[in-house]
Amino acid sequence: MHSSPRNRSQQISSSGHGLTLVGLLSLDLPAIVSLIFVVGAIVPASLVLTLGYLPFGFFNAVFGRGNMDRLVFEGAEIPLLVAGAGTVLLLAAPTFYWRVQHFRRILLSTTTAPGQIRSLNFTPLEFSVDYVYRFQQRAYAGRNAIRRNHRREKRASLRPGQDITALVDGLQPEASIVLELYSRNESGMAL
């Protein structure tokens, strides 16, 4: 890492950078996908348990463009659907909960450490930043991956070799985020 005037941990206000739990989760691909699966399991199972059917074309019927169709479930189909929804919930809900707790701990900690970007990686769905940082005289490596966001990908503060600020969970220093990646605005990044 380059020598930096930021050689020790500091406290910052995450709200001053526009960091909110909802904002962080909205960029996090595992949180988004797991939430889609949670909602996709709860809503149909709830409708089948309460109504006994799934309404299709609901919005078409409301706006007068057609009839509302029903997919009716009977007998052994209902427990099978509920069991399938329960299985999906057992897989997706813990992932979403884990991501919420991960970001919540980091936001509550508000401890920063100096770091440096090692590489940027792009896939059709994901933009990730590999970085290193120093916290309490120890070196750590991290990776933050967000859903593709062209504005953030073009930030001048996100280039290989660029000095960054890592927002670190003080109790679990391996957990961190790159402030320049998650901050709502790029101005005022330097501490």
Image: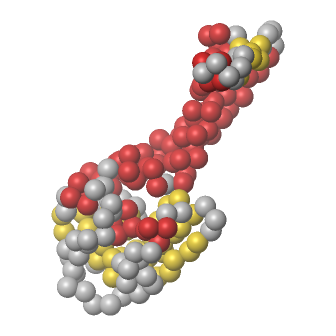
In the figure, residue 39 lies in which quadrant?
top right
Where residue 95 appears, as percent x and y from the top left, is 54, 45
Res. 38 visible in picture: yes
Q: Return the x and y of residue 154 as percentages of the image width and height.
A: 45, 75
Q: Is residue 24 above or below residue 175?
A: above
The answer to whether residue 139 shows anywhere in this view is no
Residue 55, percent from left and from top: 68, 18
Report the residue at 67% width, 32% height from top: 87
Q: Residue at x 71, y 20 (%)?
A: 66
**116 or 168: which is nearer to us?**
116
In the rendered view, does 117 fall on the left or right side of 56? left
Up-down: is 102 above or below 151? above
Residue furthest to the bottom in view is: 2
| Image point (19%, 62%), residue name | 12
Judge left or right: residue 63 versus residue 128: right
Question: Where's the C terminus, which quadrant?
Answer: bottom left
Assign the N terminus to one quadrant of the image: bottom left
Q: In the rendered view, how is the structure colored?
A: secondary structure
Residue 158 is left or right of residue 67, and the answer is left
Q: Residue at x 70, y 17 (%)?
A: 68
- Please name whichever residue, 40 or 139, is drawn nearer the observer in this view of the structure: 40
Residue 76 lies, with reference to residue 111, above or below; the image says: above
20 is higher (above) or lower (below) than 43: below
Q: Quick check: 134 left or right of 128?
A: left
